[in-house]
Every structure is written in C-alpha cells, then in structure tokens.
Amino acid sequence: MNTLLLFVLLSLLKVAIVTVILLTSVAYTVLLERKVVGRIQNRWGPSRVGPFGLFQPLADGIKLFLKEDIIPSGVYRPLYLLAPMIALGCALISISVIPFGAALRVHGVDLFQIADLNIGLLVLLAVTSVGVYGIALSGWASNNKYSLMGSVRATAQMISYELALGLSLVGVVLRAGSLRLRDIVNIQSTHGMRSWNIFGGFQFVAFFIYLIAAYAETNRTPFDLPEAETELTGGYHTEYSSMKFAMFFMAEYANMITVGCVATLLFLGGWSSPFGHLLPVIGGPIVQALLPVAWFVAKVFFFLFLYIWVRGTLPRFRYDQLMGFGWKVLMPLALANIIVTSLVLAIRG
Amino acid sequence: MHLVLFLIFAGLCLAGALNLLFQRHPINSALSLIVVMTSLAVLYLLLGAEFLALAQIIVYSGAIMVLFVFVIMLLNVGAEERTHGSRVAYLAGIPGVLALFAILASIFLSLTKNLGSAQLGGFIVSTSDLSRVLFRDLLLPFEVTSVLILVAILGAVVLARKEH
Amino acid sequence: MNKPAYMWNYIPLLMQILAAVGLAGFIIAASWFIGRHRNSKVKLAAYECGMVAQGDARGRFSVRFYMVAMLFILFDVEAVFMLPWAVIYRKLPATTGSRFFGFWEMLVYVGFVLVGFFYIWKKGILEWSKDKADL
C-alpha cells in the first residue's frame, strides 16, 4: 500500500509539472511564431511588453481572461461549451505517454515519462481520433453558417489525413516490433544518426507523409482551410470569444508540440544524440540524465520552427486539391511504403 | 480496486445507453453512444485486453461515431417528435425484453464451465500474443475481413451514387 | 517495497485525463465569471460580418462529405489491423518457418482493399472539383 501511495503522489507531481511546462511552452510557441513570422515578413513582431516582448504571452492571457464572454442566443449551449473542452482536453492528454529522456526510475517511477504504456502509440492515435469532436461539435453548436462550413470542412480534412497518418506509422512499428514508444526510440539509439528511422530505417517517405498529415491534422498552413479567413471569417471558432476562443488556440499549439514530440520519437531517434557512441561520456550522473532531454527539446524546437517557417512561406491549398492530395497521393504512398519496408525486412531477415 | 472500476464504468455504460434512448435530439443520442463505446473500452482494459480497448476507441469512438455525428451535421436532422407509441409495444415489448434477458442470463450462467470465465485485472494480454493468434492461427478469418471491407466499399458507393 | 504492477501505469494516464478535463472546465467557468456581460440583442445574434443572418444556419451538404466519412471508417479498420501485424512481423519467420509468410498474408489483405480503392478512384468519388463523379 505504501508503494502505491508513493507512486500516486509522484505521478501527481509529474502530471502537474508536465502540464505547467506544456502550457508555458504553448504560450511561448505563440510568441515565437509571432516573432519569427514577423521577421519573415520584415517586421519586428511583439517587442513592447518586457525585454524583446517576452511578457507578451502573459499580457495576452490577462487580456483574454478579461474579455467579454459572449454566448450567442442561437447556440446549442451544452455542446457549445463542451466543444472547446474536448479540443483542449484531448490536446493536453496526449503528452502523458511521451517519454522526454532516457528511462530514470526513482522508487519505480519513471521521471521522464508520465505513463509508460505498452501501447503508447495507440493512445496517441486514439486521442487524435477523439479530438475531431471538438471541432465538429463547435461548428454545429454555434448555429452560424461560417462555423458550420468550417467545421464540416475541418472534420472531412482531419479524418482523411488521419488515415495517411496512421498508415505512415506502420513502417516504424515494423522495424521496432513494438507499440511502446520507449522501444521505438531504443532501437534507434544504437549508432547515433545512422540508426534513426529517417536515415538508417529508410523511413524518410513515411516521415514526410507523417509530417504532411500532421500539418493537416493540426489545421496549420498550408492546410488551414477550416479557418480560411478570406472565405470563412474565423471558421469553426467564429462564435467563440474570450478564453473559449483561446482554448481552441491553445489546443492548436499544444497539438503542434505533441506532433513535434511524436515526430522526434518515431523518426529522429527521440532523446538519443545524433553522434551516438562517438561522443565521449562527460559529466556526472545528473548531466548524463539531462543531456538526452536537451537533445529531445532541441529536436522538438526544430519541428516547431519548421511549422512556423512553413506558415511564413507557403500559401493555402484549395479544398479540392487538399482532399485529392490526401486520398490520391498520401494514401497510396503510405501503403507502398509499408509494402516496400516489409519486403526489405523480409529479405534481410 | 478493479471491481470498483468495473462497477463505475459498467454503470456509466448503462447510463449512456439509457440516455441515448431518452434524449430527443439525435446529436445528444450520438454523444451518449460515444460514452457507451468509451466505457466499453475501459471494461476491455480491465479484462486485460489493452490492444482491443484502444482499437475500440479508435474504430468505434473515433471513426464510426464520427460518421454518425457528421451525418447529423450534414442532413440538419432536427429533434425527433415523440408519439405515445402503440399499447401493443408496451404490453408485448417490455415482458418480451425481460424474458429474453432472463433466458440469455440463465444460459450464460449454466454454461459457465464450458465458456470459461474472464478475470478482472488478473493478467494482461500483450499485443504480440494477440497478433500471434490473429496472423497465424486465425489467418483465414483475417483475410476474409478484407473481402468484407471491399464489399462495404462497394455498398457505400452504390448507396451514394446518382439515380440514372 | 514490491515492484509497481504494469496496470499501475494507467493511473497517471487517468490523472492526466482528469487534469486536462478539469483545467478545461475551470477555464470555461473562469472566463464566464471574470469577463463582464453587457449583452444586447444584436451582440447575441449570429456573426455574419454585419449582415443580418438569414434562415437556419444548418443546411444540407454535399454527399461527398458522407462518402469521406464512410470510406474513412473502412480504411481505418484496415489500418488498425496493420498495427498488430507490424508488431509481430519480424517474429513470424521463426514461428511459421517461412520468411515471406507475413509479407504474403498482408499483400493478399491489402490487395483486396486496393481493389476497392481503385474502384472508388475510377468512380470519381475522390474528385472534388469536377462534376464527372458518379455521385
């Protein structure tokens, strides 16, 4: 019983710390995006609140909380309030199965992962598939033409790309033979960069399929059709104000961070260093425990930067192009990748 | 511990199913069905079927129910209008359901020895155990599933196509 | 001190779910109580860029959206079957004695599904822009 109590308390601590870090990262990813997109467009971005605009997220948060909270009279109230909760809830859940560093156990509790499940990859897929309801219900409950069109578009887009996303993961699982995220990373951390799935595992096709599908899944440019402001005003969140709008916003950025984490774990070797065993062992046990976390954070940062870079560079797709691309290019490509990968693995034995 | 969880989620499942019947708007019924499917997934998990639990959420809560909600959104289905229903339905239906339930329960209880019993939280079935059975011993049923999917694709196209 | 059982790993997952839902509910409530409310009839109307909203927002949509959702279910089932196959794939030769056993069984499976895929492709279900689709 004592063990269980300690386990529960330590888990509670982990959940609290990780959620706070995630929410802070969300706030600063927004700032990073505004800064980087600003520089891409030859502007400064936020620079007035605090040094380099570093307190801008705080100011935005206070502003959004103090805004008038409007619930329009035509909405279907229970679902109108439930939709942002589903969106943000699902965005925050998926972080719980992600390992941030090499396993380090204290009293049987893994310090760098909230829940080490044998089916971690499936939990990620399940949360993604349930997250669709947040966007589907928000448009329907709003009783607004723009919202409904935005959410019907978004739902069709998300379920189409979910297929390509799910199929692109099969190649990775084929190589690792496990759905546990730690196993998938461990098989990639033997020879540094050479054993990463994207290089040594020959999963670069799957990597690009995953990346493109994930951009569509998170409704980011160039697939941000659901909130195409030139045609749909705000898309599915047109009728949302104050923090309810901010919840959709936070969910989008939290999903971006999760996508970055998953791409890192599945294709870029997770927390393993790119130079593998070539690097001499430096520092004491604390440095040895934290160095992998630093590699992990650096790789996730790379993906977040890529997201922002793409947003600053590419224009939006047309809806028929988007659906055609998902079904006619990504789907067959993902199936071909699975067949080729399994054939290669069978020949090599 | 496991029994408490079982009772909570079995109760949630039944409550969702009853709510499905009593709600008047189809979207509320659809959402209740999602609750039913997800609580079923937790019950599978308590029986040690990890993969099945997550597959239940991915396929039922995440795919089939999305279709339900989507169709309700697309067709602008309004709240259903209640009628009192015929007296025959009450007189024959309720005793009929009770009788069916009693027969099924007695059959399952009398055949416990033959059917075997599942244990709550006693063990866990790993995904590779499941795959070993599915992709070696039950290969034919697995391959036939693909024919089923093919037929379903044809059926969906036939249902949705234009009248000529 | 006995070792934590595997099923304990679901406790933190449950905690994270409760924390996420609790936080979301808290934000909804806080937003309602902190923000002021000065409502007027026009402010509470549906926002359509200044135009007065005409008719019901919930109309009927193209049957293509239904087809997408229907096909999604079918291909999702296929994808869910592929994951346990991928888990066992490298261990299959040892238990079946054939190196290509796993490869052929999945090729047959994918083959059937691909027949359906080419059928919907040829029927134009995947065409969104042109009107040559048989819908």
Image: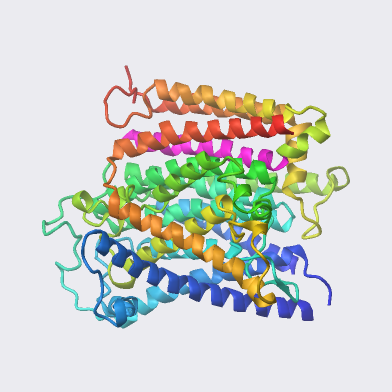
Q: Position of residue A146 (x, y in %)?
A: 24, 52
Q: Is-magenta flag for residue C87?
A: yes
Q: Is residue B154 left or right of residue C65?
A: right
By what rule are the colours in the image chosen? rainbow
Write the residue at 77% across / 60% down: B121
* Residue A263 or residue B134, whichever sits in front: A263
Give the overall secondary structure of the magenta segment: helix
Q: Is residue A222 left or right of residue A196?
A: left
Q: Eyeballing the image, is B124 above or below C122?
A: below
Question: On the image, which quarter does residue A200 sit in?
Answer: top right
Q: Residue placed farthest to the top in the image?
A: B164
Q: Eyeballing the image, is B96 above or below B50?
A: above
Write the residue at 38% across / 73% down: C28
Write the residue at 22% across / 59% down: A41
Q: Position of residue B144 (x, y in %)?
A: 65, 26
* Residue B43 or residue B137, whichever sits in front: B137
Q: Which residues are magenta?
A: C61-88
Q: Is-magenta flag for residue C134?
A: no
- On-image quarter of the C terminus of chain A: top right
- On-image quarter of the N terminus of chain A: bottom right
Q: Is residue C4 shown to the viewer in this render?
A: yes
Q: Position of residue C29 (x, y in %)?
A: 39, 77
* Residue B119 or residue B77, whichever sits in front: B119
The mark tally for this picture is: 0
Q: Is residue C119 left or right of residue A101?
A: left
Q: Is residue C61 shown to the viewer in this render?
A: no
Q: Eyeballing the image, is A174 above or below A103?
A: above
